[in-house]
Amino acid sequence: MDSIKSEKFSNCVKEMHKFAETYVQQTNTFFSIDPSVTSVIIAGLATYKNQYGVPLCPCRNYHNEEAEIELNYWICPCVSMRERKECHCKLFLQSDDSSASESQKINLDTIYKNL
Ligand code: SF4
């Protein structure tokens, strides 16, 4: 996949990695016990960031990405996360979620391994 090799995409992965680690701390949420889940979601955010300049939620199907961006609902962190701490992608998990780890860190190499 060419986008994996591009420097622009790589920078988006780093940016989304930093965002996720910062936001998980700000919201006192946690990453998944399965690092591949966290990695795939961060990579998905980076893919949209690379393509459209904003990180649309990667767990949804869109008929029209540009229209979704205009609506500003599913740009991460989405409205349900901002208002209710509900991340249906399982990127940001509350401590009582059975999928939650105790970690607010993920290694960048782990994300690259799951691309
Ligand atoms: S559900 Fe919301 S907070 Fe979770 S990854 Fe998607 S946009 Fe981000």
Image: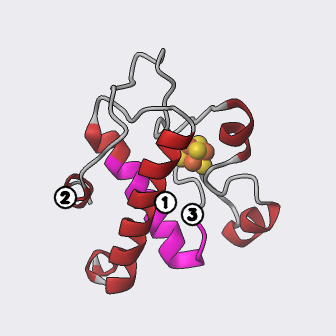
Residue at image position (31%, 84%) is 6
- The mark found on residue 55 in the picture is 3
Residue at image position (61%, 54%) is 76
Q: Amino acid at mark 3?
A: Pro
One can see residue 60 in this view? no
Q: Amino acid at mark 1?
A: Leu
Q: Name the secondary structure under disc 3.
A: loop
Label 1 C-beta lies within 8 Å of the nearest ligand 1 atom: yes
Residue at image position (28%, 33%) is 34
Compared to residue 108, the image places residue 69 above or below, namely below
Determine whether, in the image, residue 105 is placed left or right of residue 71.
left
What is the CA distance from the residue labelled 3 to the residue labelled 1? 5 Å
Q: Name the secondary structure under disc 2.
A: helix
- The mark found on residue 109 in the picture is 2
| Sequence-earlier tag: 1 or 2 | 1
Give the residues drawn in magenta, as a range: 39-55
Compared to residue 84, the image places residue 91 above or below, namely below
